Amino acid sequence: GAAGPLAGRRAIVTSGPTHEPIDPVRYIANRSSGKQGHAIAAALARLGAEVTLISGPVTIPDPAGVRVIRVERAEEMRDAVAAALPVDVAVMVAAVADWRVASTAGNKIKKRPGEAPPPLQLAENPDILKTIGHHRSRPRLVIGFAAETENVAENGRAKLDRKGADYILANDVSPKTGVMGGDRNRVKLIGRDGAEDWPEMSKDEVAEKLAALIAVKLSA
Ligand code: C5P
């Protein structure tokens, strides 16, 4: 889109889970539908931004007006994000797996009667938000999400500092909230100088509100 308050601005959004292969047919992953990340990519595009959406495996359709790069593993996602720099704003919404399988088997691991289950050795994945928050081509605005089940504000604030982000949108994803996989969300916006509770709204509305905030911050 050419017109709009974000015309001429470039954005990266990560969305969805990552899949970390165990062997050619098995993987470990986080739960993520991609709904919130895709909605943010679409909302930024509607305000005129040139958006690159870097998405793990999801079943929802590509948003309109956005360049979509599909990846599977966290390391692929990190490489795709780095390749899309420089940008004005990065919004990291993907539920990246904290660990990958240390050595992926080239062939399907066979289940043999009477044999013990195979051990799974894990290795730490790169933290993509932290990498971008401390990058030499750091975007002017770096925004992360924090899915928490307890101490939402405290954990969000700690993440802001650790990851070098400007804002963290913290949401309570404990099972009672229905946020996971649902269409609605309740977030707390945590910035350097304070936090703000947003009322419960649809994920599309969260995306609209965040895109509007980004437009204000980038024009300041
Ligand atoms: O997993 P965690 O709670 O640390 O995630 C907080 C933020 O960091 C999210 O925005 C998520 O997209 C990002 N993240 C990331 N790479 C990771 C882990 C988290 O970009 N390996």
Image (cartoon, helix red, strand yellow):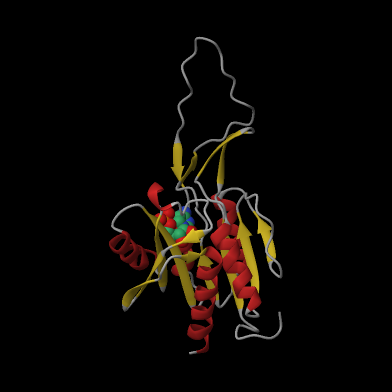
Residue 43 seen in the figure = yes
Quarter occupied by the N terminus: bottom right
Residue at position x 57%, y 68% in the image: 40
185 versus 114 height, above or below:
below
Residue at position x 60%, y 72% in the image: 43
153 versus 192 height, above or below:
above
Ligand 1's quadrant: bottom left
Image quadrant assignment for residue 9: bottom right
Query: Where does the image place residue 81, in percent across and percent down from the top left?
Result: 58, 63
Image quadrant assignment for residue 65: bottom right
Q: Nearer the viewer, residue 33 or 133?
A: 33
* Residue 141 falls left or right of residue 170: right
The number of numbered discs placed on residues in the rendered structure image is 0
Q: Nearer the viewer, residue 179 or 163?
A: 179
86 versus 72 height, above or below:
below
| Residue ranking furthest to the bottom | 220
Residue at position x 62%, y 50% in the image: 58
Image quadrant assignment for residue 152: bottom left
Query: Where does the image place residue 45, in percent across and percent down from the top left?
Result: 65, 74
Residue 130 seen in the figure = no
* Residue 3 falls left or right of residue 137: right
102 versus 172 height, above or below:
above
Q: Nearer the viewer, residue 172 or 147?
A: 172
Query: Where does the image place residue 92, in percent across and percent down from the top left?
Result: 51, 63
Query: Where does the image place residue 97, in percent across and percent down from the top left?
Result: 48, 48
